Amino acid sequence: MTVDRTGRFWRSIDRRAMELPRCGACGRFHFYPRPVCPECWSDDLDWRPVSGRGTVWSYTVVRFAHGAHEGWKTRVPYVVALIELEEGVRMMGNVVDCPVEAVRSGMAVELDYREYEDGLIPVFVPAG
Ligand SMILES: [Zn+2]
């Protein structure tokens, strides 16, 4: 049996209003979606909108996009970062709309969305 745990996430992305799973027992968000809360193991989970505010926790600059879709090969160099959201979860994402040299750990970023070959995806831009 296949369980669709990420459909709700991608539907929220399509509405440009990211939602993440939140535990009703301990109140913590988590990502990626799981059948139970990774903090307290409760299955009392709901989906809530996130603020979109976060900071760069760590990152790398991709200068050679081997194996990626053709579109990514034309975008090098680009940043792949681990973003820590205000809600306490970390997720991978591109940092866009700034030179790759400007990205730093601890940098404040905001959620945004970009249309690429595979559809709309979440990205992060320098805050305010
Ligand atoms: Zn919990």
Image (cartoon, helix red, strand yellow):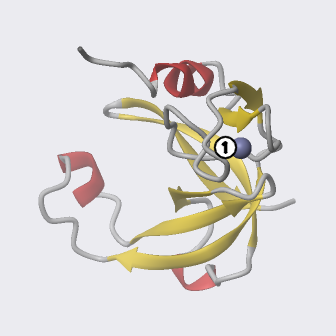
Residue 117, x across and y down, in percent: 32, 33
Q: Is residue 5 shown above or below 50?
A: above
Residue 79 horizontal side relative to residue 68, left or right: right
Quarter of the image with the C terminus is: bottom right
Mark 1, residue position = 112
Q: Quadrant of ligand 1?
A: top right
Q: Is residue 61 shown above or below 82?
A: below
**Residue 86 sits in which quadrant?**
bottom right
Q: Nearer the viewer, residue 26 or 57?
A: 26
Residue at the image point whose x is 43% and y is 79% from the top: 60
Name the residue type under label 1.
Asp
SS assignment at label 1: strand
Q: Nearer the viewer, residue 60 or 116?
A: 60
Q: Nearer the viewer, residue 79 or 19?
A: 19
Residue 95, x across and y down, in percent: 57, 62
Residue 40, x across and y down, in percent: 67, 48
Q: Residues within 10 Å of mark 1 (few under 14, many from 20)?
A: some
Residue at the outermost top position: 1
Q: Is mark 1 within 8 Å of ligand 1?
A: no
Residue at the image point whose x is 62% and y is 29% from the top: 43
